[in-house]
Image: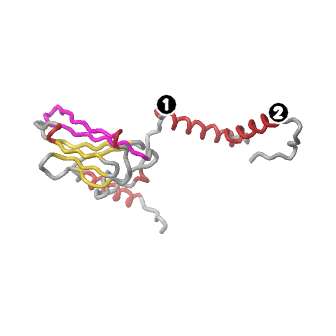
Amino acid sequence: MADKETTPAEDAAARAQEAQEQAALPYKWTQTIGDLSATFIVPGNLKSRDLVIAIKKQSLSAGIKGQDPIIKGDLPHAIKVDDSTWTLTTNPDGTKTVEIQLDKVNKMEWWAHVVTSDPKIDVTKIQPDSSKLSDLDGETRGMVEKMMFDQKQKEQGLPTSDEQSRADILKKFQDQHPEMDFSKAKIS
């Protein structure tokens, strides 16, 4: 089924509806492409031992002991449990904030909601902040730099890093075996 074009008025109405649904949640949440943060306020007299926070690979439950959870349900995507945390901090007004930080397994995917039972947001409307290469971990940075190099090489009609690597291997083999005829050799 093809997506139909929406008018600016329909877009505005959809955004207003989405904002209203999100405001009705008992918690607030934000995300980057790599992680998600959910926060909610609790009375200032509570200690961490008064909270029940269960962070699992595909589910989350968080709230005050003896009460219905504030957040509870299946996560839309997997998280790295060992790299996910929660904190309890005191606010200037005497209340406390519980912040749950979830580390996404797939760092190339926006989440439409924190738990699948909550209303969705339209992830196609997300405008990510432009990031700097220095913000990326070493492996991701290397992959992005290689992709950028290969793109620039293609635009200039030059070989990509993989093509150049194969050509270098062939050249080395040719130098080691001058007795062989490589006139019809192809690099693929």
Residue type indicated by callout 1: Ser
> Magenta segment range?
83-105
Give residue 63's mark. none
The residue located at (75%, 39%) in the rendering is 167
Q: Helix or strand or loop: what does disc 1 sit on?
A: helix
Residue at mark 2: 175
Residue in the foreground of this view, choosing between 113 and 1: 113
Circle 2 sits in a helix, a strand or a loop, which is it? Answer: helix
Quadrant of res 48: top left
Q: Toward the viewer: 185 or 90? A: 185
Question: Does the CB distance between marks 1 and 2 fall below 8 Å?
Answer: no
Q: Nearer the viewer, residue 1 or 102?
A: 102
Image point (74%, 37%), residue name = 169
Tell me the residue that label 1 is attached to. 134
Give the residue drawn at x 22%, y 43%: 40
Vertical placement of residue 76 versus 179, above or below: below
Q: Is residue 96 magenta?
A: yes
Tell me the crowding category of disc 1: few under 14, some 14 to 19, or many 20 or more residues within 10 angstroms, Cα based. Answer: few
In-image side of 133 versus 78 (left or right): right
Residue 178 pos. (x, y %): 87, 35
Q: Where's residue 20, x and y in %?
A: 26, 54
Give the spatial CA distance, label 1 vs label 2. Answer: 40 Å
Give the side of residue 72 with respect to residue 187, left or right: left
Residue farthest toward the left in the current orientation of the protein: 45
Residue 46 in magenta?
A: no
